[in-house]
């Protein structure tokens, strides 16, 4: 019996030393667990509630003396997919911002991320333009063209597709679907 206690104590010490939260008896991540850390500047992301149904909902970010809670933020509770932190100048103003990458969903070959940007030193959240609607506004597909702001690119037609009329502009600009 004694070796089991020693093994349990040793595993808790290594988890504490590595700053990895110890799962609760039900296997979840407890409230207050640190799920991301950055040095220089020192930043931490902590949970505000225990993990439920594979998600951590509500996160608290601390930078020096400033702490802000973001109750609507969510990320997967699997430690492999915990938040990523980067500190860099995202706006070109020579002032660093914090980029928090939250993985909100995953599947076979698919990962869905939510990008959050915080200003330093106050940790105020900045709006982030969703990329798909923005790209839909900026990029246009034609039967044999791809049009970007200020530039149009001619796309070669596939020989198998050239013999048949296009069903739609989107389909004709997409991958070749050989008749068969």
Image: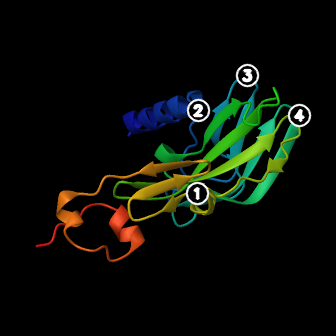
Q: Does residue 27 appear in the picture of this structure?
A: yes
In front here: 173 or 64?
A: 173
As helix, strand or loop, the secondary structure at mark 1 comes to helix
Relative placement, left or right, of 65 versus 107 is right
Give the crowd class for mark 3: few <14, some 14-19, many >=20 residues within 10 Å: few
Residue annotated with mark 3: 40
The quadrant of the picture occupied by the C terminus is bottom left
User: Tag 4: Cα neighbours inside 10 Å, few (<14), some, or many (≥20)?
Assistant: few
Q: CA distance from mark 4 to mark 3?
A: 14 Å
Q: Nearer the viewer, mark 2 or mark 3?
A: 3
Q: Which residue is mark 2?
A: 16
Sequence-wise, the earlier of marks 2 and 3 is: 2
State the residue at coordinates (84%, 31%): 64
Q: What residue do we see at 74% from left, 33% from top?
A: 43
Q: In front of the other: label 2 or label 1? A: 1
Looking at the image, tell me whether mark 2 or mark 1 is earlier in sequence order. 2
Which of pointers 3 and 1 indicates the residue nearer the eye? 1
Q: Would residue 18 appear left or right of 156 to someone viewing this image?
A: right
Question: How many other residues sit within 10 Å of disc 1, few (<14), some (14-19) or many (≥20)?
Answer: few
Give above or below for 49 relative to 3: below
Identify the residue position indicated by label 1 in the image. Answer: 135
Is 180 drawn above or below residue 28 in the view shown? below
Classify mark 4: helix, strand or loop. loop
Q: CA distance from mark 1 to mark 4?
A: 38 Å
For the residues carrying marks 1 and 4, which lies nearer the camera in this image?
A: 1
Give coordinates of residue 12: x percent, y percent: 52, 35
Dot 2 falls on a residue whose secondary structure is helix
Would you place residue 120 above or below residue 71 in this image? above
Q: Which mark is residue 65?
A: 4
Give left or right: position of 30 versus 128: left
Question: Camera-side residue: 138 or 89?
Answer: 138
């Amino acid at each position: 019996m004694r070796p089991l206690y020693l093994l349990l104590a040793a595993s808790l010490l290594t988890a504490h030393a590595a700053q990895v939260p110890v799962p609760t008896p039900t296997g979840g991540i407890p409230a207050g667990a640190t799920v991301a850390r950055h040095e220089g500047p020192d930043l931490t992301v902590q949970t505000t509630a225990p993990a439920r149904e594979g998600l951590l909902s509500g996160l608290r970010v601390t930078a020096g003396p400033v702490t802000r809670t973001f109750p609507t933020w969510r990320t997967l509770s699997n430690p492999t997919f915990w938040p990523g932190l980067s500190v860099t100048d995202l706006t070109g103003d020579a002032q660093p911002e914090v980029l928090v990458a939250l993985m909100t969903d995953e599947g076979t070959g698919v990962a869905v991320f939510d990008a959050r940007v915080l200003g330093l030193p106050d940790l105020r959240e900045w709006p982030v333009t969703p990329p798909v609607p923005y790209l839909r506004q900026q990029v246009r597909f034609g039967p044999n063209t791809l049009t970007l702001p200020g530039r149009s690119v001619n796309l070669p037609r596939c020989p198998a597709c050239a013999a048949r009329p296009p069903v739609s502009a989107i389909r004709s600009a997409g991958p070749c679907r050989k008749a068969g």
